[in-house]
C-alpha cells in the first residue's frame, strides 16, 4: 500500500522567516495538496540558547499571509501532537540509550575546555573517526569509569559513532543517486548535556513518530543526510524512511553564494516575508508584505525560484501551482534572486486584481501616511485608474495622493516659459464648461473645441492642465483625473494654478 503523503515544514523559532524558508514551506504545501496529503508545521525549538520570543507566532503569521496554512501545527493541534520539539523532550533519550546499547553511539565526557584545547592543538579539528580514540568518552574509558561518571551526574553528550570505510547512499527525488564516504563525516552530537536532543536525533525521531512520507528541505542540509540515514537504519526504521528532496539554494543576484539577510540590507531589498523586530535589540528587518507585495505575487515568485511547469507561463495562482506542481520540474541548480523580477510579478498581480481586493491594503497605506479615506467607492475608482502604474501597494500613495490632497506646489519650470495671458484666459473659459456628469471623453472633446476657438493646438495645453490638477508630469489620463476629482475640485485647482503661474 502506498504511503499517505505527510510532509512537514520544520523551522526553528530563532528570528525572521527568510524567503528560502517560505519557499520550502510552499513546496511542502504544493506537494501535499497535489496528492491529497497533509501539510504539517513542526517547531524545532530544541536549541534553547537560540530561542527567540514571538518567533513561532511570527512564522505562523507569515504562512497565513501567504495562504499556505498547515493542517496540523502547535496552534491547531492534530493526531501527532505535540508539534513543538521542546514538548517532546521525554521521548528522545530512549533512542539515544538504544543507540548506545546497540553500539551505534557513545557517551562523550569531554569538557568545553578540553575541546577548546584540542581545537588549538589540531587545525580544523572534528570529533570523529581519526580523533575519538584520543578523547574522554565511553569508547576509551573502562566500563567501570563510565558507570562512575554517570553515577556522579558528570555532564556528557551522546555522539553517533560513524562507521569506518562505508558508503551511505540514497536516492534524492531531485538529485538522483547521492553517496557519502563515512570516513569524512564527524561524530555529531545527538543528545546535549541539558538532555535536549540535537536537530539530528530529534528530526529523525519526529519524522518517524509523525509518519512523514517526504522530506523537503534546503540543499544546505545535504551534508547531514548520511547521519540521518544511518539513524533511520540504526534505530531499525529504514523500511519506513521518508523519501528525500533537497531543494536548490536561492542565490544572491550575482549568483555567488546563498542569499542572506545581509545581502538584502546591502542591496536594498527584503529577504524576510514580513517585518521582523528583534525583541532583544529592537532592530527592525523589513519584509515583503510591508514593502507592498501582494501575497499572491510573493508566492508566485517563490514558486518560480527553482521550478517551472515546462511552458513559458510565469503567472500562477496558488490553485494553479497546486495543479501543475511536480518534483520532476524542480531544478538541481541554484536560482538567482532578482528583485526587479520580483517587482514585475507584483505589478502583474496588482494590474489584474479587482479594486475591492486591493482596497483594504491601499487604505492602510494612506492611513499610515496620515490620510484617512472614508469613501470606499471613490477610492475603488482611483485604484482602478492608477493600478497599472503601481509596482508595489505602497506606490498607490505616491500615484494617488493628489486625488485627495490638492497640490501645494507645481512643476512651474515645465509651464512658465510658455505661459501667457491668452492661456490663462483659455483655462478660465474652460472652467465654465466643466460640470459633473460629463465623461472623460466629453471633457476632452470640449477642451479641444475650445482650444481651436482660442487659436491653440490642444497638445500645448494638455501639460499645463495636468500640472494644474496634480502638480507634475505624472498620473493617468488627465480628463480621467478631472472626472475623478469632480467639477468643483477641478475648477478650484485650475483657478489656484492660474494664480500661481501668473
Image (spheres, rainbow, N blue to C red):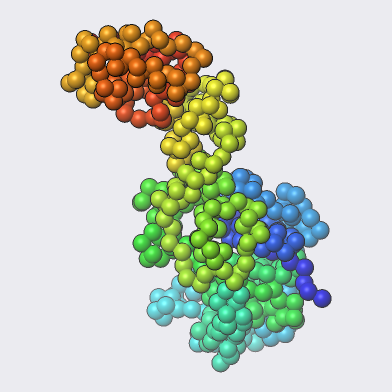
Q: Where is residue 333 in the image (x, y as percent from the top left)?
A: 47, 70
> Which of these two is toward me, 264 or 455?
455
Can you say whether 357 is above or below 76 in the image?
above
Q: In this view, does 320 lie to the left or right of 83?
A: left
Q: Which residue is drawn at 57% across and 20% down?
A: 375
Viewer-nearest residue: 188 or 286:
286
Please tell me how many numbered marks the rendered image carries. Answer: 0
Left or right: where does residue 123 sit relative to residue 318? left
Expressed as whole percent of the image width and height from the top left, the position of residue 298 reads 53, 49
Quarter of the rendering occupied by the N terminus: bottom right
**Towards the viewer: 365 or 315:** 315
- Residue 99 visible: no
Asked which quadrant contains residue 104, the reply is bottom right
Find residue 47 and report its horizontal and vertical position in percent.
60, 60
Residue extending furthest toward the bottom: 165
**Residue sitting at 59 percent across and 71 percent down?**
328
Can residue 210 be spotted in the picture? yes
* Residue at the image point whose x is 23% and y is 11% from the top: 422
- Depicted 155 relative to depicted 382: above or below: below
Q: Is residue 261 above or below residue 155?
A: above
In what quadrant of the picture does the C terminus appear? top left
At 40% across and 50% down in the image, what residue appears?
A: 340
| Quarter of the rendering containing residue 165 | bottom right
Amino acid at each position: 500500500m502506498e504511503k499517505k503523503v505527510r510532509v512537514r515544514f520544520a523551522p526553528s523559532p530563532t528570528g525572521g522567516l527568510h524567503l528560502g524558508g517560505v519557499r520550502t514551506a510552499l513546496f511542502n504545501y504544493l506537494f501535499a495538496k497535489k496528492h491529497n496529503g497533509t501539510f504539517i508545521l513542526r517547531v524545532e525549538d530544541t536549541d534553547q540558547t537560540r530561542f527567540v520570543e514571538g518567533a513561532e507566532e511570527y512564522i505562523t503569521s507569515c504562512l497565513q499571509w501567504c495562504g499556505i496554512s498547515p493542517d496540523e501545527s502547535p496552534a491547531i493541534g492534530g493526531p501527532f501532537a505535540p508539534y513543538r520539539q521542546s514538548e517532546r523532550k521525554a521521548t528522545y533519550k530512549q533512542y539515544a540509550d538504544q543507540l548506545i546499547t546497540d553500539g551505534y553511539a557513545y557517551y562523550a565526557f569531554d569538557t568545553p575546555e578540553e575541546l577548546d584545547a584540542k581545537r588549538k592543538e589540531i587545525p580544523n579539528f572534528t570529533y570523529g573517526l581519526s580523533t575519538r580514540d584520543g578523547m574522554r568518552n565511553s569508547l576509551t574509558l573502562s566500563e567501570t569509569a563510565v558507570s562512575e561518571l554517570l553515577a556522579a551526574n558528570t555532564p556528557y553528550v551522546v555522539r553517533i559513532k560513524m562507521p569506518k570505510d562505508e558508503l551511505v547512499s540514497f536516492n534524492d527525488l531531485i538529485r538522483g543517486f547521492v553517496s557519502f564516504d563515512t570516513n569524512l563525516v564527524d561524530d555529531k552530537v545527538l543528545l546535549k548535556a541539558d538532555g535536549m536532543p540535537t536537530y539530528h536525533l530529534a528530526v529523525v525521531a519526529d519524522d518517524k513518530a509523525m509518519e512523514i512520507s517526504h522530506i523537503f528541505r534546503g540543499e544546505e542540509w545535504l551534508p547531514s543526510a548520511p547521519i540521518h540515514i544511518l539513524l533511520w537504519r540504526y534505530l531499525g526504521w529504514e523500511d519506513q524512511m521518508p523519501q528525500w528532496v533537497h531543494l536548490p539554494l536561492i542565490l544572491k543576484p550575482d549568483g555567488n553564494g546563498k542569499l542572506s539577510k545581509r545581502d538584502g540590507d546591502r542591496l536594498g531589498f527584503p529577504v524576510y516575508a514580513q517585518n521582523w523586530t528583534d525583541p532583544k535589540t529592537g532592530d527592525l528587518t523589513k519584509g515583503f508584505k510591508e514593502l507592498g507585495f501582494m501575497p499572491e505575487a510573493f508566492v508566485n515568485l517563490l514558486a518560480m525560484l527553482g521550478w517551472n511547469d515546462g511552458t513559458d507561463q510565469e503567472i500562477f495562482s496558488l490553485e494553479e501551482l497546486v495543479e501543475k506542481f511536480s518534483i520532476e520540474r524542480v531544478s538541481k541548480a541554484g536560482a538567482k534572486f532578482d528583485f526587479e523580477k520580483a517587482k514585475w510579478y507584483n505589478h502583474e498581480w496588482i494590474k489584474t486584481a479587482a479594486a475591492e481586493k486591493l482596497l483594504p491594503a491601499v487604505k492602510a497605506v494612506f492611513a499610515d501616511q496620515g490620510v484617512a479615506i472614508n469613501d470606499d467607492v471613490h477610492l475603488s475608482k482611483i485604484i482602478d485608474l492608477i493600478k497599472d502604474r503601481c509596482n508595489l501597494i505602497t506606490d498607490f500613495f505616491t500615484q494617488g495622493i493628489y486625488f485627495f490632497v490638492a497640490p501645494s506646489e507645481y512643476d512651474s519650470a515645465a509651464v512658465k516659459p510658455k505661459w501667457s495671458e491668452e492661456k490663462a484666459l483659455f483655462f478660465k473659459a474652460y472652467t465654465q464648461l466643466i460640470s459633473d456628469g460629463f465623461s472623460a471623453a466629453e471633457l476632452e472633446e470640449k477642451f479641444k473645441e475650445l482650444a481651436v476657438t482660442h487659436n491653440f493646438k490642444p497638445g500645448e495645453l494638455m501639460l499645463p492642465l495636468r500640472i494644474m490638477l496634480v502638480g507634475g508630469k505624472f498620473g493617468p489620463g488627465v480628463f480621467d483625473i478631472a472626472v475623478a476629482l469632480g467639477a468643483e475640485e477641478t475648477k478650484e485647482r485650475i483657478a489656484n494654478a492660474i494664480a500661481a503661474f501668473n
